[in-house]
Image: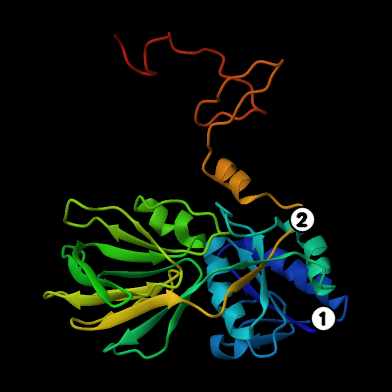
Amino acid sequence: MTLVGFVVHTGRPQAVDSAASLVEWLRARGVTTRSLSDEAVGADEKADTEAFAEGVNLVVSVGGDGTLLRAADLARRADAALLGVNVGRLGFLTAVEPAAAPALLALALEGRAPVEERMAIEAIPEGCPWERRLWALNEVMAEKRARHRLVTMAVFVDGEYLTTLSGDAVIVATPTGSTAYSFSARGPIVTPRLDAILLTPVSPHMVFDRSLTLDPDEEVALEVRGEEPGLVSADGRPSVEFPIGARVRIRRSDRRARLVRPVDGPSFYRLLREKFDLPVDHLRGGSGGVARPGEHPDRPPPASEPPKGRAPGREG
């Protein structure tokens, strides 16, 4: 491995400092580094977005999940694995904290780090003013353009008409993206070990407002109807125009994301428990019990509890 590319959240000083430290660590081992042209992290080379992927053997993102999603598209172009260093708030996708990054990076350089493959999707435009396919690890979203308007879209699955939705947006997500925007719109959580496509409407003006879970080989098509155009975006990157009468076909991508993981990293279910603060069992002194939201087995219980039969903050 001779060239490592960095994608850094430059708005966070800790991310810049962590990236600079890793660049120095790699240089001491004879590895060349590259960063995007607007990221001053002391890398050997600077490149714009189009040239970044050329020759890169590994991509390192330093920031939060949003930074990792940006880096994932660049890693896909380079056909390289992606290592995420968490300097963000949620850190659901990023693999390690800055202090543990050098050890995992060393394993990656030696080809001994575990690599987890994740399903991705791509959006293919038809009748749109843009021609490039959009690749996404999390989701492709077709949404309204005007704040106080709705966008109307006909939905097709494998060429068969399903329904027409009027609302704020339609999200087509992967299992990885099931804990992102789709989750916020009441979509299901899906283990990333399962390949599937999630179709989630956002605030639709109809009684049916549930997600559909589709086979990964089924293709979703969205076509703008009515009088309002829309926008299309992939993984939160800048939106592109979605004119009336245009269509996008969204299907499983042939190029999967490859995420570098720690040898003894947390499981998907542990991340769910910790990131979403799920209730857990208290195992103190052999007594059972389920923790209330916000409580953890390694934290002491509250000093006082409300009387039984009353909800906190309520009388009578």
Which residue is nearer to you in this view: 104 or 47?
A: 104
| Residue lying at 67% horizontally and 79% vertically, measured from the top left | 80
Q: Please indicate whether residue 81 sits to the left or right of residue 278 in the image.
A: right
Q: Amino acid at mark 2?
A: Ala
Q: Secondary structure at mark 2?
A: helix
| Mark 1 or mark 2, earlier in chain | 1
- Reply above or below: 6 against 203: below
Residue 168 position by quadrant? bottom left
Q: Are marks 1 and 2 in contact (CB under 8 Å)?
A: no
Q: Amino acid at mark 1?
A: Val
- For the residues labelled 1 and 2, the Cα–Cα distance comes to 20 Å
| Residue lying at 79% horizontally and 70% vertically, measured from the top left | 108
Q: Position of residue 28 (x, y in %)?
A: 88, 75
Per the image, the residue denoted by label 1 is 31
Q: Please indicate whether residue 275 sits to the left or right of residue 174 in the image.
A: right
Q: Position of residue 36 (x, y in %)?
A: 61, 81
Classify the position of the C terminus by image quarter: top left
| Residue lying at 55% horizontally and 61% vertically, measured from the top left | 65
Q: Is residue 145 visible?
A: no
- Reply above or below: 55 against 256: below
Per the image, the residue denoted by label 2 is 99
| Residue lying at 60% horizontally and 91% vertically, measured from the top left | 51
Looking at this view, name the residue that lies furthest to the left.
227
**Mark 1: few/some/many CA within 10 Å (<14, 14-19, 20+):** some
Classify the position of the N terminus by image quarter: bottom right
Looking at this view, name the residue that lies furthest to the right.
29
Which residue is nearer to you in this view: 68 or 12?
A: 68
